[in-house]
Image (spheres, helix red, strand yellow):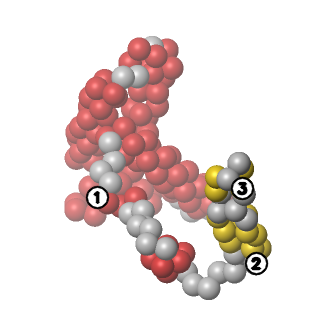
Amino acid sequence: MLARSVKSLQVTGVKVASRSFVSSNVNNGSYSEEQAKKGRPISPHVEIYKFPPAALTSITNRVTGGLLSVGMTGIGVLALAGADVSSIMSNIGDISVVGQTAKLSVAFPLVYHYLAGIRHIAWDRNPELLHTDKVTQSSHVLIGSSVAISVVLALL
C-alpha cells in the first residue's frame, strides 16, 4: 500500500492544498463488489444494446465464413477417407424434410457469404456508399436476398 499525504502549504497566509492520496493494489473482492463499495455504477453488458444492421450483417458474414470452412473441411476429410461424398449428399438431399433443411443449411451460408463479399467489393470501389443510411439499406437487402435465394435453392 502506498500512502502519501500532501501537507497544507502556507503561501502568504493562504491555505493552498490539503489532500491525502491512497493507492492500493490489494484486491479484496470481485470487480463488481469493489465498484459497489465505491458507489460507482457497473456498465451494462453488451447484450442490452441493440446492434445496428451493419454490425449484425458483419457478424453473420464472419460466422457463415467459419461454417463454410468447417463444412468444406469435413467434406474433404470424408473424401480423403475414401467415402463417396457425392452419393452421400445425394442420398441426404433425396429425403424430403431433412434434405431441404440440409440444402438450406448449405445454401444460406454460401449465398450470404458470397453476396456480402460482393457488397464489400462495391464498398471498396465506391466509398461514397459508406453512409449510415445506405449501409443500413444494403444490410436489409443483403439479408432479404440471401434468405430468398437460399429458400429457392433449397427447394430445387
Give SS at disc 2: loop
Give whichever of 39, 107 is nearer the camera: 39
Q: In the rendered structure, which amino acid carries the disc numbered 3?
A: Gln
The relative height of residue 155 versus residue 95 in the rendered view (above or below) is above
* Nearer the camera: disc 1 or disc 3: 3
Residue 23 image position (x, y, % from top left): 69, 71
Residue 119 image position (x, y, % from top left): 41, 26
- In the displayed image of the protein, which residue is found farthest to the front? 13
Give SS at disc 3: strand
Quarter in which the N terminus is drawn:
bottom right
In contact (CB < 8 Å): disc 2 and disc 1: no
The numbered dot on residue 101 is 1
- Classify mark 3: residues with Cα within 10 Å, few (<14), some (14-19) or many (20+): few
The residue wearing badge 2 is 1
Q: In the rendered structure, which amino acid carries the disc numbered 2?
A: Met
The relative height of residue 94 versus residue 35 in the rendered view (above or below) is above
Q: In the rendered structure, which amino acid carries the disc numbered 1?
A: Thr
In contact (CB < 8 Å): disc 3 and disc 2: no
Precedes in sequence: disc 1 or disc 3: 3
Q: Estimate the spatial distance between the alpha carbons at disc 2 and disc 1, rounded to whole Å.
A: 62 Å
Precedes in sequence: disc 3 or disc 2: 2
Residue at 28 percent across and 26 percent down: it is: 133
The relative height of residue 25 versus residue 155 in the rendered view (above or below) is below
Give whichever of 97, 83 is nearer the camera: 97
* Nearer the camera: disc 3 or disc 2: 3
Please state if 66 lies on the left or on the right of 25 as rendered.
Answer: left
- Classify mark 2: residues with Cα within 10 Å, few (<14), some (14-19) or many (20+): few
Q: Estimate the spatial distance between the alpha carbons at disc 3 and disc 2, rounded to whole Å.
A: 29 Å
Give whichever of 56, 1 is nearer the camera: 1
Give whichever of 154, 22 is nearer the camera: 22
The residue wearing badge 3 is 10
